[in-house]
Image: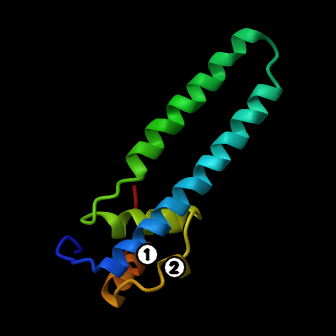
Amino acid sequence: MFRDFTWSKTEKTIAKKAFDGAYNKECKVIVARVKDLMADLPEPRAIWVIHDYLSKQRKETDEKYDYRYSVLPLVFARLIREGWLTLDDLQGLDEEKIRSIQTMLKLGDLP
């Protein structure tokens, strides 16, 4: 559906800015959660709860944030669905790429 897209230099810049912005937003939420967990540690051994949380988040973000141009439309659709991006963040991308992302959003079967 989208593997044959070519990306102009301008589109690559827009995509990178949107991708990095979403990643940074999500990381800030993770940091805030860790701070909350640390503030409520009932005992020192509870630190492993934080370790487990961070390990889970690391795995999920590593799987989600894939900056290969061949999968970026799918990544962007998922990030929009999860609230980390909006279509406005992708303004300037080719209309065909935007339509592809919108189609994936309508289908709803995103990882």
Left or right: where does residue 22 sit relative to residue 36? left
The secondary element bearing badge 2 is classed as helix
Q: Looking at the rendering, which quadrant does residue 6 occupy?
A: bottom left
User: Which residue is found at the position 76% from the left and 26% from the top?
Assistant: 38
Q: Nearer the viewer, residue 87 or 19?
A: 19
Give the residue at mark 1: 14
User: Which is in the foreground here, disc 1 or disc 2?
Assistant: 1
Q: Could you tell me the amino acid type at mark 2?
A: Leu
Asked if marks 1 and 2 touch (Cβ < 8 Å), the reply is no
49 lies above or below 73: above
Give the residue at mark 2: 87
Label at residue 35: none
Q: Could you tell me the amino acid type at mark 1?
A: Ile
User: Which residue is found at the position 31% from the left and 87% from the top?
Assistant: 96
Q: Dot 2: few (<14), some (14–19), or many (≥20) neighbours within 10 Å?
A: some
In the picture, the quarter occupied by the N terminus is bottom left
Q: Nearer the viewer, residue 52 or 105?
A: 52
Q: Distance from label 1 to label 2 (Cα)?
A: 12 Å
User: Which residue is found at the position 63% from the left and 17% from the top?
Assistant: 48
* Sequence-wise first label, 1 or 2: 1
Left or right: where does residue 20 sit relative to residue 104? right
User: Which residue is found at the position 28% from the left and 80% from the top?
Assistant: 8
Can the viewer see residue 82 in this picture?
A: yes
